[in-house]
Image: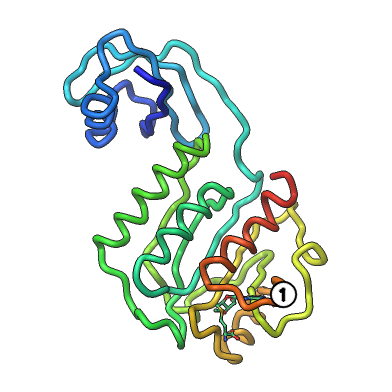
Protein backbone atom coordinates (compact mmCIF):
# COMPACT_ATOMS: atom_id res chain seq x y z
CA UNK A 1 0.00 0.00 0.00
CA UNK A 2 1.36 3.48 -0.78
CA UNK A 3 2.07 5.82 2.19
CA UNK A 4 -1.13 7.05 3.79
CA UNK A 5 -2.30 9.06 6.85
CA UNK A 6 -5.70 8.15 8.25
CA UNK A 7 -7.67 10.17 10.78
CA UNK A 8 -8.61 7.96 13.70
CA UNK A 9 -10.12 9.86 16.68
CA UNK A 10 -8.69 8.47 19.93
CA UNK A 11 -6.36 6.07 18.05
CA UNK A 12 -8.74 3.30 19.17
CA UNK A 13 -7.48 0.60 16.82
CA UNK A 14 -10.59 0.87 14.63
CA UNK A 15 -10.79 3.25 11.67
CA UNK A 16 -13.96 5.27 11.04
CA UNK A 17 -15.98 3.84 8.14
CA UNK A 18 -15.09 6.63 5.71
CA UNK A 19 -11.37 6.09 6.34
CA UNK A 20 -11.80 2.30 6.19
CA UNK A 21 -13.45 2.52 2.77
CA UNK A 22 -10.65 4.72 1.46
CA UNK A 23 -8.04 2.22 2.64
CA UNK A 24 -9.91 -0.74 1.17
CA UNK A 25 -11.35 0.65 -2.06
CA UNK A 26 -8.75 3.24 -3.14
CA UNK A 27 -5.53 1.94 -1.59
CA UNK A 28 -6.42 -1.80 -1.75
CA UNK A 29 -5.05 -2.35 1.77
CA UNK A 30 -4.17 -5.88 2.91
CA UNK A 31 -3.56 -7.34 6.35
CA UNK A 32 0.02 -6.50 7.34
CA UNK A 33 0.15 -3.19 5.40
CA UNK A 34 1.59 -0.24 7.35
CA UNK A 35 0.15 3.28 7.39
CA UNK A 36 -0.01 6.33 9.68
CA UNK A 37 -2.92 7.13 12.01
CA UNK A 38 -3.39 10.50 13.67
CA UNK A 39 -5.55 12.36 16.18
CA UNK A 40 -5.41 15.77 17.92
CA UNK A 41 -1.85 15.52 19.33
CA UNK A 42 -0.76 11.99 18.48
CA UNK A 43 0.47 10.21 15.42
CA UNK A 44 1.47 6.56 15.13
CA UNK A 45 2.73 3.99 12.67
CA UNK A 46 0.08 1.26 12.50
CA UNK A 47 -0.39 -2.09 10.83
CA UNK A 48 -3.65 -3.43 9.39
CA UNK A 49 -4.79 -6.49 11.37
CA UNK A 50 -8.34 -6.96 10.05
CA UNK A 51 -9.95 -5.62 6.87
CA UNK A 52 -13.54 -5.34 8.08
CA UNK A 53 -14.89 -2.80 7.31
CA UNK A 54 -14.20 -1.20 9.68
CA UNK A 55 -10.45 -1.69 9.26
CA UNK A 56 -8.79 -2.69 12.55
CA UNK A 57 -5.18 -1.81 13.20
CA UNK A 58 -2.42 -2.25 15.79
CA UNK A 59 -0.11 0.62 16.77
CA UNK A 60 3.58 -0.12 16.24
CA UNK A 61 5.14 3.20 17.25
CA UNK A 62 3.77 6.54 18.53
CA UNK A 63 5.21 9.92 17.53
CA UNK A 64 4.56 13.48 18.72
CA UNK A 65 5.54 15.80 15.84
CA UNK A 66 5.03 19.58 16.36
CA UNK A 67 2.88 20.92 13.55
CA UNK A 68 0.68 23.45 15.36
CA UNK A 69 1.09 27.23 15.53
CA UNK A 70 1.33 27.08 19.33
CA UNK A 71 -1.64 29.36 20.09
CA UNK A 72 -5.32 29.09 19.23
CA UNK A 73 -6.03 30.67 15.83
CA UNK A 74 -9.70 31.33 15.09
CA UNK A 75 -10.68 32.43 11.59
CA UNK A 76 -14.02 34.19 11.13
CA UNK A 77 -14.66 34.59 7.40
CA UNK A 78 -17.93 36.17 6.34
CA UNK A 79 -20.42 33.77 4.72
CA UNK A 80 -19.62 33.73 1.01
CA UNK A 81 -21.50 32.80 -2.15
CA UNK A 82 -21.29 29.37 -3.79
CA UNK A 83 -18.43 27.09 -2.77
CA UNK A 84 -15.90 29.78 -1.88
CA UNK A 85 -15.70 28.78 1.79
CA UNK A 86 -14.40 25.36 0.73
CA UNK A 87 -11.24 27.03 -0.57
CA UNK A 88 -10.94 29.06 2.65
CA UNK A 89 -11.37 25.99 4.90
CA UNK A 90 -8.80 23.95 2.95
CA UNK A 91 -6.14 26.66 3.01
CA UNK A 92 -6.91 27.76 6.59
CA UNK A 93 -6.42 24.18 7.78
CA UNK A 94 -3.06 23.97 6.00
CA UNK A 95 -2.09 27.32 7.53
CA UNK A 96 -2.79 26.23 11.11
CA UNK A 97 -6.25 27.59 12.02
CA UNK A 98 -7.73 25.80 15.04
CA UNK A 99 -11.29 27.04 14.53
CA UNK A 100 -13.20 28.29 11.49
CA UNK A 101 -16.58 29.88 12.02
CA UNK A 102 -18.37 31.84 9.29
CA UNK A 103 -19.95 35.20 10.14
CA UNK A 104 -23.33 36.43 9.01
CA UNK A 105 -22.71 40.06 8.10
CA UNK A 106 -24.84 42.86 6.67
CA UNK A 107 -23.53 42.44 3.12
CA UNK A 108 -23.20 38.63 3.10
CA UNK A 109 -25.41 37.39 0.28
CA UNK A 110 -26.13 33.99 1.88
CA UNK A 111 -27.54 34.46 5.38
CA UNK A 112 -27.38 30.82 6.48
CA UNK A 113 -25.61 27.55 5.80
CA UNK A 114 -27.30 24.14 5.51
CA UNK A 115 -26.25 21.11 7.56
CA UNK A 116 -25.00 19.36 4.38
CA UNK A 117 -22.65 22.21 3.51
CA UNK A 118 -21.29 22.37 7.07
CA UNK A 119 -20.57 18.62 6.99
CA UNK A 120 -18.78 19.00 3.65
CA UNK A 121 -16.61 21.81 5.04
CA UNK A 122 -15.79 19.64 8.07
CA UNK A 123 -14.78 16.78 5.75
CA UNK A 124 -12.55 19.19 3.79
CA UNK A 125 -10.83 20.18 7.05
CA UNK A 126 -10.12 16.50 7.83
CA UNK A 127 -8.66 15.96 4.33
CA UNK A 128 -6.52 19.11 4.51
CA UNK A 129 -5.23 18.17 7.97
CA UNK A 130 -4.20 14.78 6.61
CA UNK A 131 -2.45 16.24 3.60
CA UNK A 132 -0.58 18.87 5.58
CA UNK A 133 0.61 16.47 8.26
CA UNK A 134 -1.43 18.13 10.99
CA UNK A 135 -2.61 16.09 13.93
CA UNK A 136 -5.28 18.53 14.94
CA UNK A 137 -8.34 19.01 12.74
CA UNK A 138 -9.74 22.54 13.15
CA UNK A 139 -13.29 22.84 14.40
CA UNK A 140 -15.58 24.05 11.60
CA UNK A 141 -18.63 25.54 13.31
CA UNK A 142 -22.05 26.76 12.09
CA UNK A 143 -22.26 30.47 11.19
CA UNK A 144 -22.99 33.10 13.84
CA UNK A 145 -24.15 36.71 13.44
CA UNK A 146 -21.23 39.13 13.68
CA UNK A 147 -22.66 40.69 16.85
CA UNK A 148 -22.54 37.28 18.60
CA UNK A 149 -18.73 37.16 18.38
CA UNK A 150 -17.09 37.09 21.81
CA UNK A 151 -14.51 39.65 22.97
CA UNK A 152 -11.11 38.37 21.91
CA UNK A 153 -7.63 38.41 23.48
CA UNK A 154 -6.03 39.50 20.19
CA UNK A 155 -7.99 40.12 17.01
CA UNK A 156 -7.44 41.52 13.54
CA UNK A 157 -10.03 42.44 10.96
CA UNK A 158 -8.98 42.74 7.31
CA UNK A 159 -10.29 46.09 6.17
CA UNK A 160 -9.58 47.98 2.99
CA UNK A 161 -9.44 51.35 4.78
CA UNK A 162 -7.11 50.19 7.59
CA UNK A 163 -3.65 51.66 8.32
CA UNK A 164 -1.96 49.00 10.49
CA UNK A 165 0.05 46.15 9.02
CA UNK A 166 -0.13 42.64 10.46
CA UNK A 167 3.54 42.59 11.45
CA UNK A 168 3.09 45.81 13.48
CA UNK A 169 0.37 44.34 15.70
CA UNK A 170 0.88 40.55 15.73
CA UNK A 171 1.83 38.89 19.04
CA UNK A 172 2.11 35.10 18.75
CA UNK A 173 2.22 34.81 22.52
CA UNK A 174 -1.54 35.40 22.57
CA UNK A 175 -4.46 33.57 21.00
CA UNK A 176 -5.51 35.05 17.71
CA UNK A 177 -8.87 35.79 16.08
CA UNK A 178 -9.06 36.93 12.45
CA UNK A 179 -12.12 38.37 10.69
CA UNK A 180 -12.57 38.89 6.96
CA UNK A 181 -15.50 40.52 5.19
CA UNK A 182 -17.85 39.27 2.46
CA UNK A 183 -17.74 40.09 -1.27
CA UNK A 184 -19.38 43.48 -0.55
CA UNK A 185 -17.11 44.26 2.44
CA UNK A 186 -17.99 45.05 6.06
CA UNK A 187 -20.29 47.97 6.86
CA UNK A 188 -18.40 50.69 8.82
CA UNK A 189 -20.58 49.99 11.91
CA UNK A 190 -19.52 46.35 11.73
CA UNK A 191 -15.84 47.32 11.71
CA UNK A 192 -16.53 49.55 14.75
CA UNK A 193 -18.29 46.70 16.55
CA UNK A 194 -15.37 44.38 15.79
CA UNK A 195 -12.97 46.98 17.21
CA UNK A 196 -15.02 47.09 20.43
CA UNK A 197 -14.57 43.31 20.63
CA UNK A 198 -10.77 43.61 20.34
CA UNK A 199 -10.18 43.36 16.58
CA UNK A 200 -7.61 45.77 15.12
CA UNK A 201 -8.23 46.73 11.45
CA UNK A 202 -5.32 45.65 9.23
CA UNK A 203 -4.39 46.44 5.67
CA UNK A 204 -3.40 43.68 3.23
CA UNK A 205 -1.83 45.76 0.48
CA UNK A 206 -2.83 48.20 -2.22
CA UNK A 207 -5.07 45.87 -4.19
CA UNK A 208 -8.63 44.76 -3.42
CA UNK A 209 -8.45 41.04 -2.74
CA UNK A 210 -11.30 38.61 -3.16
CA UNK A 211 -12.70 37.74 0.27
CA UNK A 212 -11.27 34.19 0.10
CA UNK A 213 -7.83 35.49 -0.98
CA UNK A 214 -7.91 38.02 1.87
CA UNK A 215 -8.68 35.30 4.46
CA UNK A 216 -5.78 33.17 3.22
CA UNK A 217 -3.38 36.13 2.98
CA UNK A 218 -4.18 37.32 6.52
CA UNK A 219 -3.75 33.88 8.02
CA UNK A 220 -0.56 33.24 6.03
CA UNK A 221 1.00 36.46 7.36
CA UNK A 222 0.25 35.37 10.94
CA UNK A 223 1.44 31.75 10.70
CA UNK A 224 3.49 30.82 7.62
CA UNK A 225 5.09 34.28 7.48
CA UNK A 226 6.28 33.82 11.08
CA UNK A 227 7.60 30.32 10.46
CA UNK A 228 4.75 28.85 12.48
N1 LIG B 1 -15.54 47.06 -1.63
C1 LIG B 1 -15.27 46.18 -0.52
C2 LIG B 1 -14.64 46.98 0.64
O1 LIG B 1 -14.19 48.09 0.41
O2 LIG B 1 -14.56 46.46 1.78
C3 LIG B 1 -14.33 45.09 -0.96
C4 LIG B 1 -14.53 43.86 -0.21
S1 LIG B 1 -13.25 42.66 -0.48
C5 LIG B 1 -13.73 41.98 -2.00
C6 LIG B 1 -13.72 41.42 0.68
C7 LIG B 1 -12.99 41.48 2.00
O3 LIG B 1 -11.63 41.14 1.83
C8 LIG B 1 -12.99 42.81 2.69
O4 LIG B 1 -14.16 43.01 3.47
C9 LIG B 1 -11.75 42.72 3.58
O5 LIG B 1 -12.05 42.02 4.76
C10 LIG B 1 -10.82 41.90 2.73
N2 LIG B 1 -9.89 42.67 1.91
C11 LIG B 1 -9.77 42.65 0.55
N3 LIG B 1 -8.74 43.39 0.14
C12 LIG B 1 -8.17 43.91 1.26
C13 LIG B 1 -7.04 44.77 1.51
N4 LIG B 1 -6.31 45.25 0.53
N5 LIG B 1 -6.74 45.07 2.80
C14 LIG B 1 -7.48 44.60 3.82
N6 LIG B 1 -8.55 43.78 3.65
C15 LIG B 1 -8.89 43.44 2.39
- Which of the two residues, 216 or 228, is positioned nearer the viewer here? 216
Is 155 left, or right, of 3 in this rendering?
Answer: right
Q: Is residue 156 above or below residue 216?
A: below
Q: How many marks?
A: 1
Name the quarter where the N terminus is drawn: top left
Q: Where is mark 1, residue-wise?
A: 203
Where residue 222 sits, quadrant-wise, is bottom right
Task: Please report the residue visible at 38 percent of the width from the left and 74 percent of the height from the top.
Answer: 81
Q: Is mark 1 within 8 Å of ligand 1?
A: yes
Task: Please report the residue visible at 50 percent of the width from the left and 56 percent of the height from the top.
Answer: 99
Coloured how?
rainbow
Residue located farthest toward the front when viewing the structure as drawn:
207
Residue 140 at x, y percent in the picture:
41, 56
Q: Is residue 128 above or below residue 222?
A: above
- Which of the two residues, 128 or 122, is positioned nearer the viewer here? 128
Residue located farthest toward the top when viewing the structure as drawn:
32
- Which of the two residues, 168 or 131, is positioned nearer the viewer here? 131
Name the quarter where the C terminus is drawn: top right
Residue 50 at x, y percent in the picture:
22, 14
Task: Please report the residue visible at 42 percent of the width from the left and 73 percent of the height from the top.
Answer: 79
Q: Is residue 173 above or below residue 185?
A: above
Task: Please report the residue visible at 51 percent of the width from the left and 53 percent of the height from the top.
Answer: 91
Residue 47 at x, y percent in the picture:
36, 13
Residue 149 at x, y percent in the picture:
52, 73
Residue located farthest toward the right when viewing the structure as drawn:
168
Helix, strand or loop for disc 1: loop
Q: Is residue 120 above or below residue 28?
A: below
Ligand 1 quadrant assignment: bottom right
Amino acid sequence: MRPHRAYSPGLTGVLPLRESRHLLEVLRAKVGDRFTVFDVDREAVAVVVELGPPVRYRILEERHPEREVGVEVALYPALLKGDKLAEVVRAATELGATRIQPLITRHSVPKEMGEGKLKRLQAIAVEAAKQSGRLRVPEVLPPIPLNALPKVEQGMVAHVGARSLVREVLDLGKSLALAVGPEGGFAEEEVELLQEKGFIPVFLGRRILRAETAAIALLALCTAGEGR
